Amino acid sequence: MPHLALESVSLRYDGGAPVLSNVSLDIASGEFVVVVGRSGCGKTSLLNLAAGFLHPTSGRVLVDDRPVAGPGAERAVVFQNDALFPWLSTAENVAFAARLAGASAAERRLQADRALEIVGLAGLGDRPVWQLSGGQRQRVGLARALAAEPDFLLMDEPLGALDAMTRETLQDLLLQTWGRNRAGTLLITHGVEEALYLATQIIVMAPGPGRIIRRLDVDFGRRRLAGESARSIKASPAFVEAREDLLDSIFEREAA
Amino acid sequence: MSLDLADTALGRPRAAEQSETEPSTTRKRPVVAITATLTIIALLLAWTVAAHFKLVSALFLPSPFEAGRAFLRVASEGFVDATLWQHLSASLGRVFAALVATTLIAVPIGFSIGASPIGRGIFDPIIEFLRPIPPLAYLPLVIIWFGIGEPSKVLIIGISMLAPIVISTASGVKGVDTDRVNAARSLGATRAQLVRHVVLPSALPSILTGIRIALGVGWSTLVAAELVAASRGLGFMIQSAAQFLVTDVVLMGILVIAAVAVALEAVLRWIERRLVPWAGKA
Ligand SMILES: Nc1ncnc2c1ncn2[C@@H]1O[C@H](COP(=O)(O)OP(=O)(O)OP(=O)(O)O)[C@@H](O)[C@H]1O
Ligand SMILES: [Mg+2]
């Protein structure tokens, strides 16, 4: 089973203070790991290490027990500011990996249409991406990642810039696609409710230097996939309690 | 923004361009257009009045009508052995030849400055050295080295175009969004594919801006270039007319040069809108 691991990873940007210290993390297929923590605690750095955009100062990043040398198509990334290519149509954005691999226009189109369908954007393939709304663009970013059929999906606050309603819709979309393809997922978020709602495992980080202070397993996402309504999950005592508990973890250290 | 950078690098801040990039000024545009039209009408009137009442000798300041007549005359009969159209196409030919050659050289140089410290180390000093030299200063040297043929004229124009394109290209390449590069890398892009599929299209708006500015600069270098033993060209036409004190042709030539510059600018802007409609929107 595909398996992404960070082993005792530390990171400092050339010469600066350590940004991550001794971070270990493990994501297998079918897991949805959500990282929360205060601003500047190194969440993005962590994701960039997992993606292979950065190299650890010490420790190792492994995919299936092999050290990663850089980014790879088995780890697709969804960016906070979408990072789409405005010179390409929506469909060509989605099929970008296929384009790089030399797929024909017809193949690319087929693949793009399928992925766009999944994210609820069927029929928008010919639109220039710069004419899409923020929420639509995030969906395209997700479709682009999904179309590459990755083993792992790495997302850095993909819903951070969206309004509350769009965010909730897309949370369900993330949950459904994960439920279907079971890609090992790493999601970074500021939203405590979002973390609880989506995760199978939540990782709480603290700054100075960035480190993991808590891991907890949750199953609200599975309940949602099993058919329970978002409303009843978020109103349930267990959810409310977990939320307060998580907020305490995140902010406790600041008060101290 | 790259556009501003390229412009200031040339030391030619362009008020019109800057206001165009600010959305808040869209409402002001009609006001600008009306004021501009009125200014032009006022200048034409002043010119007509000055010529009509002989405030300046007709030898030095022919009326707008005489300039218009000169236009028709040179367009049909020609001046110094060539019609206006032939002068114009000779000039345009030189400027476009220079543009094509310079673009082919300047874009790769801009890429290497933008993408690698070594490239920057090699080319930055050269560009910084060439940039401030006025064409009239290197004109004699170009003649000594390359003679008085057509290549020298193209070269003089080309040199003046080099810096704007290099600088805009470099700033476009430097400005490539890191997330986009990372996105492509994580989707399996090789280095060559990154350049082809991400860096080049990202830098394209900036490159086009550089080309547009270069075209303006090159066009204004024209007269200097045609000082070199030309037998055709708008610059040559003006100089010949000046020698014989045919002031109406001189004035007409200046107006034609200005009109062509405006037209070129408009065409390039149209091309930019067609080719990079996303510029500034994503
Ligand atoms: N390229 C860089 N060079 C030097 N320091 C950096 C760099 N990127 C981030 N840092 C520093 O590393 C620390 C962690 O940054 P990081 O972006 O990983 O935090 P984050 O948890 O993602 O924050 P946020 O929630 O605000 O996005 C910060 O102190 C930041 O200043
Ligand atoms: Mg971050």
Image (spheres, coloured by chain):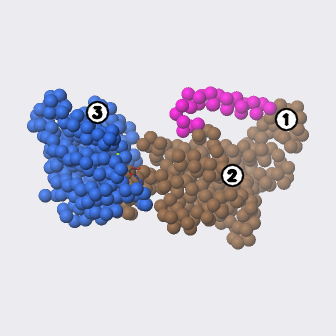
Q: Nearer the viewer, mark 2 or mark 3?
A: 3
The magenta span reads B19-46
Q: Nearer the viewer, mark 1 or mark 3?
A: 3
Dots 2 and 3 on the same chain = no
Residue A217 at least partly seen: yes
Which residue does the numbered mark 2 point to in the structure image? B220
A153 relative position to B1: left or right: left
B147 relative position to A57: left or right: right
A103 relative position to B117: left or right: left
Which amino acid type is shown beneath numbered disc 3?
Thr
Badge 2: how crowded within 10 Å, few (<14), some, or many (20+)?
some
Which residue does the numbered mark 1 point to in the structure image? B51
Rendering coords of residue A225 (x, y %): 13, 38
Q: Are marks 2 and 3 in contact (CB under 8 Å)?
A: no
Q: Colour of chain B?
A: brown
Furthest toward the left, the residue is A226
